Amino acid sequence: MGLRRPKPQYAQIGKYRVRLALNSQWLHLRSVYPLYDTALGRIAGALRTKYPTLHAIDIGANVGDTAAVIRESAEIPVLCIEGDPVLLPILTENVARMGPGVVIKPSLVGPDAKYGNLELTDDVGCNASLVRALAPNGSVKLRSLAAILADHPEFSSAKLMKTDAEGFDFDILRQSLEFIKQSRPVVFFEYNPHFRVDAPHAGVDTIEALIRAGYSDFFYYDNFGHP
């Protein structure tokens, strides 16, 4: 008798039916915490009013649920950057239902000279983290945001940037300061000061770097969407 394959889970986000990753807690969290994963949609809606040609960059796009949340409030172009080989087919399936304007970049974001070893990552297929997976002989070459935008110049002036890279967010933001200074997007990122040993200092350094880049207003949400 063969093992039964897990039944896919789907979420309805606005008009989009989104297939979730295996073991995703999205449905449970949204049912218990109605504000979970909603803030970015409200931000996108407000920004669309100010910037009619609003574009968004989604680093760590996962299965495209964030892109769906953004487009639920504002049907804008979104660059979905995701390098997890397990999530990419699901992301591709979901993006196909979102219509034109959503672009997939199959890549892991990091310094251009660095490599990652996916065999060392935690939670591949769910929320993969590169914190312990950087390796000089890794099989996957990381790409900087600048290099990715060179391939997709239509997003080079994006006014909304989201990153959720499971402990790698501070590095990505500090490495992307040239783009941030030039475009001055709203930056929505996961602030987790406990992912690794240097994270508390890296978090403070990142906030200070954003202040030096001209940012003065910060909004904080807990993991369940409460301001």
Image (cartoon, grey):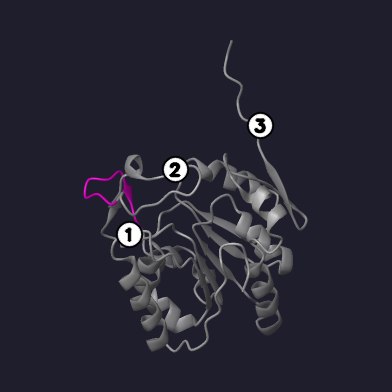
State the residue lying farthest toward the top: 1
- Say whether residue 90 is left or right of residue 178: right
Residue 169 placed where, x, y %?
41, 65
- Say whether residue 127 is left or right of residue 6: left
- Say whether residue 199 is left or right of residue 219: left
Task: Say which label, 3 or 2, has the lower sequence index.
Answer: 3
The kind of secondary structure element at disc 1 is loop
Disc 1 crowd, CA 10 A, few/some/many (<14, 14-19, 20+): few
Residue 201 placed where, x, y %?
31, 72
Task: Say which label, 3 or 1, has the lower sequence index.
Answer: 3
The kind of secondary structure element at disc 3 is loop
Task: Say which label, 2 or 1, has the lower sequence index.
Answer: 2
User: In what quadrant of the picture does the N terminus appear?
Assistant: top right
The residue wearing badge 3 is: 7
Disc 2 crowd, CA 10 A, few/some/many (<14, 14-19, 20+): some
Check whether the beta carbons of the residues at disc 2 and disc 1 lie within 8 A of each other: no
For badge 1, the amino acid type reads: Arg
- Say whether residue 59 is left or right of residue 132: right
The residue wearing badge 1 is: 196
Cα distance in 3D space between marks 3 and 2: 19 Å
Q: Is residue 95 visible?
A: no
Residue 14 placed where, x, y %?
76, 58
Q: Which residues are magenta?
A: 134-142
Observer-nearest of 121 and 36: 36
Q: Residue at x 28, y 52 (%)?
A: 134
Cα distance in 3D space between marks 2 and 1: 18 Å
Q: Is residue 53 magenta?
A: no
For badge 2, the amino acid type reads: Val
